[in-house]
Amino acid sequence: MNNLRYSRFGTGSSRLGSVAALLALVLLVAAQGCGGDGNGGTTIVEYCGEFDPSQAPAPGRVAMRLGDDDSCGIVVIEIVATDLDDVAGLAADLTYDPTFAFLTDVSTSGSVLTSDGAQVAAHVEESILGQVTVGIARTGVPGIDIQGTQLVATLLFVVDTLASNSGQITLTDQCLTGGGTPPDPLPGLVCSGGTIRVR
């Protein structure tokens, strides 16, 4: 496959379909959490998610940053890498607090790992809610050199509007692999996460 798509709503090539389903879910949760307005009506309370990275992208590092999406209740987070040589894939444990948000989608659309036309093999598993193993590897080709800050993978979270107002996302260090056989983690690589906030 050229682009990994892990989704609680099934697989597919269109991100719009997944976002539409997520919007429907967000509206449903908001409606369930609403109360009366004192006049016998219903007040819809809209919650939004924000993301604060723990570190900005920097040479020789992997970081997270807020992606582009204007949908309240949905947080798009990009895993990005800066100035690294011979990168063959992503192999990491991702942890987050499922009491405030849940992961719904992982995608390599637009990833530097496939920018030269390479295909990727992928495995995403969340055997315990809030603990995700992500493995993405270029297949049959050498590693790729990353110049500047480039996208590796995209994460899509839905905020639980009835829970706590913030929670941490962490990514294990040495989260990228090199182009050797077998691929080994890039030594000394720091991979940082951040905090999702509900407002």
Image: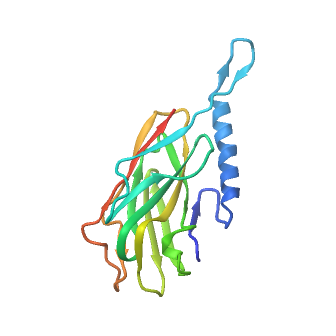
Relative height, residue 160 to residue 104 (above, below): above
Give the residue displayed 48% in from the left and 57% down from the top. Answer: 78
Q: Nearer the viewer, residue 34 or 49?
A: 49
Name, please, the residue furthest toward the front.
148
- 43 sits left or right of 160 in the view: right
Residue 88: image quadrant is bottom left
Q: Height in image: 97 above or below 128?
A: above
Quadrant in the picture for residue 23: top right
Which residue occupies 43% across, 62% down? 80
Which corner quadrant of the image does residue 48 belong to?
A: top right
Indicate left or right for 132 with 103 as reference.
left
In the image, residue 61 lies at what x, y percent? 33, 62
Where is residue 184 drawn, in percent x and y?
31, 77
Q: In this rendering, is residue 189 above or below 24? A: below
Q: How is the image coloured?
A: rainbow
Residue 46: give x, y in percent of width and height. 62, 32
Task: Tell me where residue 37 appears, x and y as whole percent.
Answer: 69, 16
